[in-house]
Amino acid sequence: MVRHRKGGKEQHKNGNNETSSSSGSSDSSVGNKSFKLLSLWKTMLGFVCLGIAVYVGTLGYLETRVNTPFDDEKVVQNSGLSIPERYWGTYRPGVYLGLKSREPRSPVFGLMWYDLASAAQKGIRHWCDQGDNLPTYGWLWHDGVSFGEQRISDPPHNIITSFVKTPGGEHGGHWTARINVTSKINTSTPFALIWYAALDESLGGAALHSRLWLDGDSLLGHTPHLHNFKINLLPHSGKLLHMSHSEAHAPGLHLLKEKLYSLLREHKLSGPHGRVPALGQDEDLTGQEKEVNFVPIQLLVQPPFVLDVVYSTEDLPTPPLKGDEYTTVLENKKKDFDEEFEKKFKLAEKGYKQEDIAIAKAAMSNMIGGIGYFYGAGRVQSQYTREPVPYWRAPLYTAVPSRSFFPRGFLWDEGFHGLLIGRWSPDIQMDIVAHWLDLINVEGWIPREQILGSEALARVPKEFVVQSNAAANPPMLLITLAQFVNKNRELFEPHAPYRSMLDRMFSRLQAWYQWFQNTQKGEEPTSYRWRGREDDGLQLNPKTLSSGIDDYPRASHPSNIERHVDLRCWMYAAADAMATIADVLQRDTSKFEALRDQLGDEELLNELHWSPRTQTYADYGMHTDGVKLVRQAPKNPSEQAKLVRSVTTPPHPRLVTSAFGYVSLFPMLLKVLRPESDNLGKILANLDNPDLLWSPYGLRSLSKSSPLYMKRNTEHDPPYWRGQVWLNVNYLALAGLRHYARRAGPHAAAAAALHDRLRDNLVGNVLSEYKRTGYLWEQYSGEDGKGSGCKPFSGWTALFVLIMEGEY
Ligand SMILES: *[C@@H]1O[C@H](CO)[C@@H](O)[C@H](O)[C@H]1NC(C)=O
Ligand SMILES: *[C@@H]1O[C@H](CO)[C@@H](O)[C@H](O)[C@H]1NC(C)=O
């Protein structure tokens, strides 16, 4: 951005110069005073017009840059039906069970349920929602390609959902989903299962030759890609009390449950059940021009009940799976998965107990089963756009951090996800990276949070929707890709399967890398600064959302003199990653190596970031520890007193040494320091101190001795990266420790010992919290190890599978 802004200004100035020199020559040739005045006036008008033209032209150009795609061949060349094995999937991670195909305009299918006995309090279940307070849910098996099995506990009911695909034919093949409801208590109250199909209104369902309709009890549909398909709901066992359905119009995929409520009518059931809800006609459809885009079918059942939902495409003669045959195929798939999992991660061989291995399988299955396929346009803004503007419409195939809380793509999270996904399936990993890199714009920027489509948008608070092109996010995706390429070189040799894809990625990676160099540099040579910090007078310490570690304390007063040690280390790792990839592609590596070596120069690093006083690495900026939140007397009595920041000691330029924590560790985390470095020894000694970062549950994000340890940032902002244990950074710490343990040097033994203790602490706590709570968590308390933040969080927390394995 800085470069473009400068360019704009220069152009502007040139325009002025040309105009004033031409006005000078016309002045000297004319004597008449009034004529001269007129001429001056004309010249000025000309000058203004030219100025405006240049200004508007430049502005128009700059305005459109933020949502102009990077100008090169797309990385994703095959998608949709041309990759049949990943065509259908549970690509709607934000619902408890939802299927769709990897097609921008795919119809969506899904499950809702409610218990008649408690429907008034609990409502209808559909979206994964923390407010539902389910004791546990999540995939126990999921291979990302052919099947999965999920367990959902919604007391007194247990619901097991599974699916198996039957590939073949030209239109995506068949699939079968099974829903198995059991109850812990003997009750005769009916339980409602709703299966639905829907078309995305915002993409023009009917206008695009897609249709849904009912034929008896079957749900039929047609789309240009799927041709004719059919869904039959086949009770496998148990008692079906009543079945009802509806052809309806929903105003959007984010309003399916609301629409369903409006379709429920009272219905008199013969027998002991009396009046029950049943689906009826959609009043909105009668007499209006609206098309059917939502077809729900409701089954009132008496648990235990097993339902097979059988999707079949007309063009595949093989009969779809159902009944006992489905049971057998599913059991075999689970067995194959178990064998493959052991082959890859060797947890049994390493001596882990079966119950712990089952948790590791669930963690990995949730990461893989949480992969979604999104389509739409996010909203972005640059300094040249008056209003947020839409990005271009694009697909994104990506894992998500949390199905309940963050069911969409996040840039730096995906870098961590890739560490595990790449181990399970190189095909899936490469496909995910390819989709992300196609989201890069002409400036080399990738929006940090991807909110694509109405379902995704409905889950995001307004203030987080618009992405600014000034904001970076750690380039973990690049670093993980380079590691993957390096470990699987055979896939990237000339003529190997992924060579040409990596070739297509390269110009985009280079543009992204260059974007960091152009936009995130600090004032001092070789220093870097995260953009996007803003002091609103309310935050105890202004957040740095772009860094990924939002409220981690930085300089108290954001300014241009700031420099961030974590970003500088990310840039070291990014340069190293680019060099690795360039090397595999037999391209020029010198420029990347030069920057890597410069950023790896410990003396330079120390000059910018080492505090001889505290013997730690730190950020630098306008800083004071003299800040606190105080209640400000309201201006008039009707207002509430609000908390604002008060500064008791003025800031001055200095190292932010009081914020000892993850940021201080980065030169070790990203392996910037040499094995023989004295400062590495200091970091290791500091790690092993329970009064600072060390806890029995992993490394805390911020030292217990820091003034902002576990402090709220504002009235409404509880601490987030101010002491809690986060798995992603702990993973980096283990990888760093292992790196130094395996290199000869004075700190190898200490690093090895710390590695083993930290690994045992992390694995022990994640497993015991899963057993206690039924979930993986976003973070863990550094005080008592309890899971905190959102759940389930099977994004980077699932990296404990790799930690158990001990391979980084
Ligand atoms: C349904 O779930 C129950 C309880 O987990 C299990 O015993 C049963 O075998 C399942 N039935 C089918 C057909 O999968
Ligand atoms: C439920 O009822 C059946 C038959 O009425 C009985 O056999 C069974 O033991 C009961 N189960 C529970 C958990 O009460």
Image (cartoon, rainbow, N blue to C red):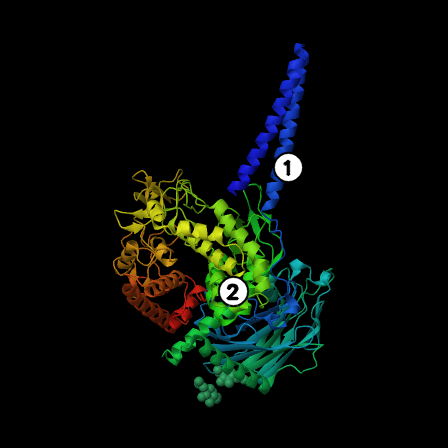
Q: Determine the secondary structure under disc 2.
A: loop
Between disc 1 and disc 2, the foreground one is 1
The front one of 213 and 57 is: 57
User: Which of the 4 image quarters holds residue 231?
Assistant: bottom right
Left or right: residue 778 versus residue 336 is left
Compared with residue 7, is residue 796 higher up or lower down, i.e. above or below?
A: below
Q: Disc 1 residue type?
A: Gly
The front one of 266 and 568 is: 568
Left or right: residue 712 versus residue 20 is left
Residue 545's x, y, as percent? 44, 51
Residue 58's x, y, as percent? 61, 37
Please report the residue visible at 57 percent of the width from the left and 58 percent of the height from the top. 505
Specify which label sits upstream in the sequence, 1 or 2.
1
Q: Determine the secondary structure under disc 1.
A: helix
Q: Disc 2 residue type?
A: Ala
The front one of 550 and 586 is: 586
Q: Quote the CA–CA distance across marks 1 and 2.
A: 40 Å
Q: Pointer 1: what residue? A: 57
Compared with residue 50, is residue 246 higher up or lower down, i.e. above or below?
A: below
Compared with residue 100, is residue 333 higher up or lower down, i.e. above or below?
A: below
The front one of 336 and 581 is: 581
Please report the residue visible at 53 percent of the width from the left and 47 percent of the height from the top. 469
Residue 592's x, y, as percent? 47, 52
Res 81 seen here: yes
Res 402 seen here: no
Q: Pointer 2: what residue? A: 399
